[in-house]
Image (cartoon, helix red, strand yellow):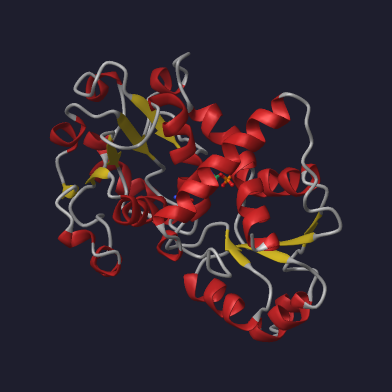
Amino acid sequence: MKKDLLSLLDLEKEDFEILFKRAGQLKERYAKGILDKLLTGKTLGLIFDKKSTRTRVAFETAMIQLGGHPIYISTQDTQISRNEPAKDTARVLSRYMDCLAMRTFDHSLVEEFAEASTIPVINALTDSFHPCQILSDLMTIIEHKGGYEGVKIVWVGDGNNVANSWVNAAAVLDLDLTVACPDGYGIDPDIIKAASADKNPRIRFTHDPKEAVRHADVVYTDVWASMGNEAELSGRIKVFQDFQVNKALLSLAKKDALVMHCLPAHRGEEISEEVLEDKNAVFWDQAENKRHMHKAILEKLILKN
Ligand code: CP
Ligand code: NVA
């Protein structure tokens, strides 16, 4: 595996497989009360310029359960807010800790940190990508569907950071992925090109949500306005109307289709209340699996094994 995890294009298929296997083992062992403390004495720094419940808490608990220590580094309370250059901050933090997880706006900032630091840098979400999310979501798909091969995954909604990471995962793992977004809100063509997704017939792009979800095994959605785009929400609500994941849309998917959402969800917008509250929903498994997958990622990057 490379030094950093900034996008899923940083991983080979083999890396994905190693992470799925180890995250599954760690989950099973934790459930039996076995604590794997392979990161005793190690420190993880967390710099989050955007809000987070799941990703931050899952990284912190993962690090503590592995015997290490997380340190939340508030931008406001450090010299970062007084414009100390990213490359200087990265070099200094590399002298104190063993890994850095960052959530920020512009993807180039995590690249700048990774370039200057000697410790692994993990992208905990940028405007462009959310790689750790898709790793834990694929773990959830494997648990519920027995694998990802032959599983038809459909993205319905905004062509955002989470969707971009699905395209990257599909390119590396040769997933059957259909992405349905309103015209003008699709995946950035540069992202498609960088993943060579335009050359893969199993990765399809459409503006028709109904056609897309036909025979789907997984229907995945996310907010219509991501963090940083909130001002556009009222305009988007009109454009995205037909892209709500509700019972009517899901009736076109396979009967046992999984409905997935990275959360937080906006009820009555991208997903209906009844779908979100469905007793068979896997959203909470997705959220839990972030902790197990983050452990596998931290072990792999910090121990370089
Ligand atoms: N899914 C996810 O990344 O959630 P948070 O924004 O709460 O971290
Ligand atoms: N696309 C969402 C994901 C949140 C986990 C956002 O960036 O706000």
Tell which of 34 and 195 is nearer to you: 34
Tell which of 60 and 156 is nearer to you: 60
Instruction: Answer yes or no: is residue 47 visible.
Output: no
Instruction: Please tell me whether residue 80 is drawn above or below residue 291 in the rendered image.
Output: below
Report the residue at 48% width, 13% height from top.
279
Residue 57 image offset from top left, x and y in percent: 70, 44
Report the residue at 23% width, 59% height from top.
197
Instruction: Answer yes or no: is residue 203 visible.
Output: yes
Q: Quadrant of residue 146?
A: top left
Residue 101 image offset from top left, x and y in percent: 65, 61
Tell whether 190 sits left or right of 132: left
What is the tally of numbered marks visible in this picture?
0
Report the residue at 27% width, 38% height from top.
154
Instruction: Please tell me whether residue 276 is drawn above or below residue 22 in the rendered image.
Output: above
Residue 135 image offset from top left, x and y in percent: 48, 46
Residue 251 image offset from top left, x and y in percent: 22, 18
Tell whether 251 sits left or right of 15: left
Tell which of 80 and 163 is nearer to you: 163
Q: In which quadrant is the C terminus drawn?
A: bottom right
Q: Quadrant of residue 229?
A: bottom left
Residue farthest top in this picture: 279
